[in-house]
Image (tube, coloured by chain):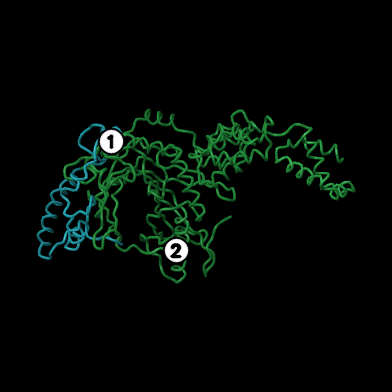
Chain colours: A green, B cyan
Amino acid sequence: MSYFLTGKTGPWEIVVGLEVHAQVISRSKLFSGAATEFGAEPNSQVSFVDAGFPGMLPVLNRECVAQAVRTGLGLNAKINLVSRFDRKNYFYADLPQGYQISQFEHPIIGTGAIDIELDSGEIRTIGITRLHLEQDAGKSMHDQHPDKSLIDLNRSGVALMEIVSEPDMRSPEEAGAYLRKLRMILRYLGTCDGNMDEGSMRADVNVSVRKAGEAFRTRCEVKNVNSIRFVMQAIEAEALRQIDVWEAGAIVQQETRLFDPARGETRSMRSKEDAHDYRYFPEPDLLPLVLDQAWIEALRAELPELPDAKRARLIRDYGLTPYESAIFVQEQATADFFETVAQGRDAKQVANWMLGDFFAGLNRTGKTIETSPVSADDLGALLDLMTDATINGKIAKEVLEIMVDTGEKPAAIVESRGLRQVTDTGAIDAAIDQVIAANPDKLGEYQSGKEKLFGFFVGQVMKAMQGKGNPALVNAALKAKIG
Amino acid sequence: MSLDPATIRRIAKLARLRLTDAEIPRLQGELNAILGYVEQLAAVDVTGVEPLSGGAQMALRLRDDVVTDGAMPERILANAPDRIDNFFAVPKVVE
């Protein structure tokens, strides 16, 4: 299903490319030994290099290079054995050097591709143009003082990967799916935490519109959008604006714009127009970065199983549906949890319990798989109690709720609350007699052919037994009594 | 290459330097002299020669990922013309 926006002159196709800035997970900064931890006291994680003091020289962090290479491998991309750093010059208060060390002409990672899946189930391949390493700037705060901006340089010099896609996306949905997939891959690789709230992943969105079959028209760049939802909204808002411009007979000017989520519209960032003259030149303080193929292969050998491969394996090895497996692979921890529980158990049953009552319980209590009060072993033990007929399925649901609330072990809950399934046929018969005696009219209806009422009797007997009757035994005994 | 006064103003603006009109001819002369000096290199035939990023034929030194620096906000802020708490304070720059 193609996505089109309809203007006065008919349908328009939208064309989207994304530049994602992903903060590299490393202990220290790209070119200095200062720490990178989020939320530290202002200017407490700043070296003289990060503050742009004269005479300070950058020294490249090997781990940041490794993280870029891992990411490149995860994006099925070409690793460039020789890359180079360049200076991108611009003036801003939170950029103490007056330039950003980046990679312009020769990035560390070249072209790659990732697959995204749409709601319809359709798979689309989105090209990656490049990935390069660069320094982040400091943080400016404009709302703390009437006529001053406050600058914290803790973020100055932290390593970023700028990941540039091809203009391959054709709808807000595809852009959202791309960002989610990219974030998932980065999190699996452990190269970026993907936390958009803390700014460790930010997107610049390139948008243009065109009539079907045309070449690309002029694009605009919407800067610094900080959530997937806003990216999707910004694309639609900017595309609609451009359609209006074209349909009014005017021309879309290439420019940088900002998205205002409150108004749901983009606006021009006039002050940036001048700043586009970045005067890139090779960074004289750094030699070219030359990678050893053997080192790259060593990094490749240590890569974790990535989402696509894990998903295919869950389907193949456990008989999960594509839908079930997609949910489990969203977080590595969820997939690990599933595999731990499924070990030696009925995988379909494990999947049903996790996707049903277990996730519902986590949602209800605001917990995640990482903070779950129920361990994989505990959930497994609960399923075992059902398998060996200690408890029935209905009671198991109750036990799971208690486990989620209290973190108690399932066997202890069953014992302390007397939830053990009743298999004593004498007790079952007694309950049946009691129910029959209390419902002579229903019995009459049933015996005169209203067979559906059998379910009613099963329910009443289970209720009389506080839900603890063995369902198979109850069914059999009831059949014997009332026919 | 010769820089005209408009280019001099643009370069100054990008570097956030405020120039008076009187300063422009002097800077124009100086910058053009520097460019002229460097442009002598254009006389060299570099056909088939790879661009060189550095003079030293050695590999880039890399650093281990350990925290060895920072935790000195007073020294970082010592030369700041203005500060508020442990932040640098600058004239308001806002879009």
Whether residue B14 is situated above or below residue A333 in the rendered picture: below
The local secondary structure at tag 2 comes to loop
Residue A279 seen in the figure: no
Tally of numbered discs: 2
Pinpoint the chain carrying mark 2. Answer: A
Tell which residue pokes out farthest to the bottom in this image: A248
* Residue A212 location (% of width, % of height): 52, 60
* Residue A292 location (% of width, % of height): 34, 30
| Front residue (pair A166, A175) | A175
Q: Which amino acid, by three-letter code, is at mark 1?
A: Val
In this rendering, position of residue A282 left or right of residue A391? left
**Residue where numbered disc 2 is placed:** A264
Between circles 1 and 2, the one closer to the viewer is 1
* Residue A253 location (% of width, % of height): 37, 64
* Residue A64 location (% of width, % of height): 34, 37
In this rendering, position of residue A19 left or right of residue B17? right
Quadrant for the N terminus of chain A in the image? bottom right
Q: Which amino acid, by three-letter code, is at mark 2?
A: Gly
Whether residue A231 is situated above or below residue A130 in the rendered picture: below
Mark sitting on residue B67: 1
Callouts 1 and 2 on one subunit? no
